[in-house]
């Protein structure tokens, strides 16, 4: 059974360069649950594209930019946290 030991170590970071922009994106181990891999893949693709299929569009927020996913989007913070919590508890 796949089990999360700690979130920071479980979800690492991967560097992806697109044009002149370097993205620091989350990465997950190969043995992570498929639903977590799918959610992270969608989130990463949306981050690089600047928009998500849920309708979110990247917007400047101070010195950074944010992509605020719609409630219920599998790539949202809440959805990914729910997946992590479910797998941490073995459910
Ligand atoms: Zn989204």
Image: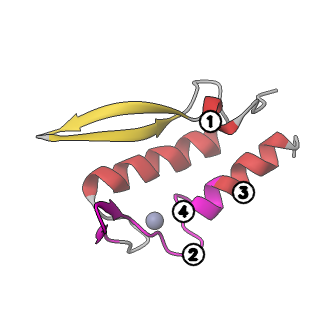
Q: In this view, does 10 lie above or below 76?
A: above
Describe the element under mark 1 as helix, strand or loop.
Answer: helix
Q: Is residue 53 above or below residue 87?
A: below
Image position, residue 8 (x, y; %): 62, 36
Image marks 4 and 2: residues in contact by CB distance under 8 Å: yes
Mark 3 to mark 4: distance in Å? Answer: 10 Å
N-terminal-most mark, 2 or 3? 2
Q: Does the magenta stretch include residue 78?
A: yes
Q: Which residue lies at the image location 29% right of the left edge and 34% below the top edge?
A: 16
Label 4 neighbour load within 10 Å: few <14, some 14-19, many 20+: many
Image marks 1 and 2: residues in contact by CB distance under 8 Å: no
Describe the element under mark 4 as helix, strand or loop.
Answer: loop
Circle on res. 8: 1
Image position, residue 81 (x, y; %): 68, 54
Mark 4 to mark 2: distance in Å? Answer: 7 Å
Question: How many marks do you count on the picture?
Answer: 4
Image position, residue 47 (x, y; %): 34, 54
Q: Which residue lies at the image location 88% right of the left edge and 44% below the top edge?
A: 89
N-terminal-most mark, 4 or 2? 2
Q: Which of 87 and 5 is in front in this view?
A: 5
Q: What stretch is highlighted in magenta?
A: 57-80
Q: Is residue 24 above or below residue 60?
A: above
- Asked if disc 4 is less than 8 Å from ligand 1, the answer is yes
Label 2 neighbour load within 10 Å: few <14, some 14-19, many 20+: few
Q: Which residue lies at the image location 72% right of the left edge and 47% below the top edge?
A: 84
Describe the element under mark 3 as helix, strand or loop.
Answer: helix
Q: In this view, does 56 lie above or below 50?
A: below
What residue sits right under mark 3 in the picture?
Answer: 82
Left or right of 91 in this view: 20: left
Q: Which of 90 and 65 is in front in this view?
A: 65
What residue sits right under mark 4 in the picture?
Answer: 76
What residue sits right under mark 2 in the picture?
Answer: 71
């Amino acid at each position: 059974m796949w089990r999360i030991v700690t979130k920071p170590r479980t979800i690492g970071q991967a560097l992806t360069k697109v044009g002149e922009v370097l993205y620091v994106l989350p990465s997950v181990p190969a043995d992570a649950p498929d639903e977590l891999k799918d959610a992270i893949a969608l989130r990463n693709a949306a981050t690089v594209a600047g928009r998500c299929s849920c309708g979110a569009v990247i917007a400047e927020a101070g010195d950074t930019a944010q992509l605020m996913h719609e409630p219920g989007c599998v790539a949202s913070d809440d959805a990914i946290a729910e997946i992590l919590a479910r797998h941490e508890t073995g459910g």
